[in-house]
Amino acid sequence: MNNAFASHFAKSMFVAVSALVILSFIGTRMFTHVDLNLYGYMIGTLVFLGGFFYRFIAWGERPPTKIMIKKGIKLLFRKSTPKTSVNHLATYKFIWNRGIYRWAQHMMIGWGCIISCFVTFPLVFGWMYFTMEEGGYYTIVGMGIDIMTVPADGIIAFFSYNALNFSALMVITGVCMALYRRLKNLQARAEQQFMYDFLPLYLLLFISITGLALTFINVFLHGAGHYAMSLIHQYSVIITLIYLPFGKLAHIPFRPLSVFARNYREHYAKKSTKTCKVCGEGFVSTEQSNDVIDVLGVNNLEFQMKEGFHLAELCLPCRRKYRISKFSGFATHEVPVKEANQNAKG
């Protein structure tokens, strides 16, 4: 199959677009329920896929990434994978250790975006839609199958039609928390950049506000200005989708690969641990240390020291002391005293 395409990018795009067309064909009952008002979102999604595959393939072709993905797939069915997936993709436990405020901020933004995607993309590609029945009832259709019929003024219909409003409120809350932290936290203020740190937040904020404005116009203004606001909202979503693979928001679709990295570290750490050539303490798995040495060799980066060890065979504290010794002329890496700040946080 690889020989039928000019590149991995071409193959990925062909497979992805073909899958979307097939799913849309099934979901819309042979394209009989297509909402042309959502056509712009569909085009934006296809452009996003192009940018995502371009970025992912460029990143995935790197030697260290290849190793992590290859071994991560083999370890995907470990018993701990469900727990790791929940911690990294659902509860964000790894952020909890950095503080409750940052955890709440990421929960609001993360789950707000996830909910909006779970609602928007099925509607855009026709995988889910609603049909109006007689007597004030709606039928929820999923992948061309009538799932359930609910009252138009019932609780299920209420949450179905307001899911995007709830997700918008979550995103607005999380973005405001993030902006407040970036304006008040001294470390964040010193490191942040407008295009990389602020622009993604402003885009999410603009999408959420214009989305809520559509609901406000329909409910309180009886649809006045709906056409103009719908175009503004649609263009903001399309621009964000095009920008997403190339900015800070790219970590959202890449985040699932953190499960691969976690499995990789945990699995091989249980097998055998690499001991530091200087202090003798275990600091990383033998597999990871060997992989680092192999990857450096592939990139023609040799860190074999004249003392008879590879730099990757030293733990971080000893590695720092060894580098200091090269500048000072004093063999600090041979001093058995540990660094005072080797376990410092921040």
Image (cartoon, rainbow, N blue to C red):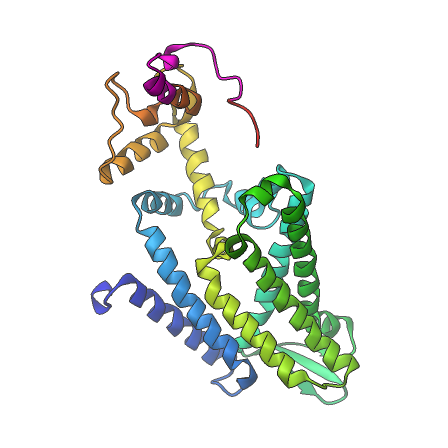
Q: Is residue 92 magenta?
A: no
Displayed quadrant of residue 49: bottom left
Q: Nearer the viewer, residue 72 or 294?
A: 294
For the residue pair 18 and 112, the one nearer the viewer reads as 112
Q: Is residue 187 left or right of residue 43?
A: right
Would you identify the image quadrant in which residue 33 lies?
bottom right
At x 79% / y 78%, what residue is drawn? Answer: 153
Q: Residue furthest left?
A: 3
- Give the left or right position of residue 48, taking residue 107 as reference: left
Report x, y in % for residue 229: 64, 79
Above/below status of 157 relative to 188: below
- Where residue 28 appears, x then y in whole percent? 52, 81
Closest to the observer, 1 or 218: 218
Residue 328 forms part of the magenta stretch: yes
Quadrant of the frame with the N terminus: bottom left
Identified at 39% across, 13% down, the residue is 332
Could you tell me which quadrant the C terminus lies in?
Answer: top right
- Location of residue 215 in the rendering, given as x and y in whole percent from the top left corner: 71, 76
Which residues, given as a range, are shown in magenta? 322-341
The residue at the point 30 percent across, 31 percent down is 290
Q: Is residue 276 visible?
A: no
Looking at the image, is 19 positioned above or below residue 247? below
Q: Residue at x 70, y 71 (%)?
A: 212
Relative to residue 153, is residue 51 drawn left or right? left
In the picture, measured across the screen, residue 202 lies left or right of residue 257, that is right
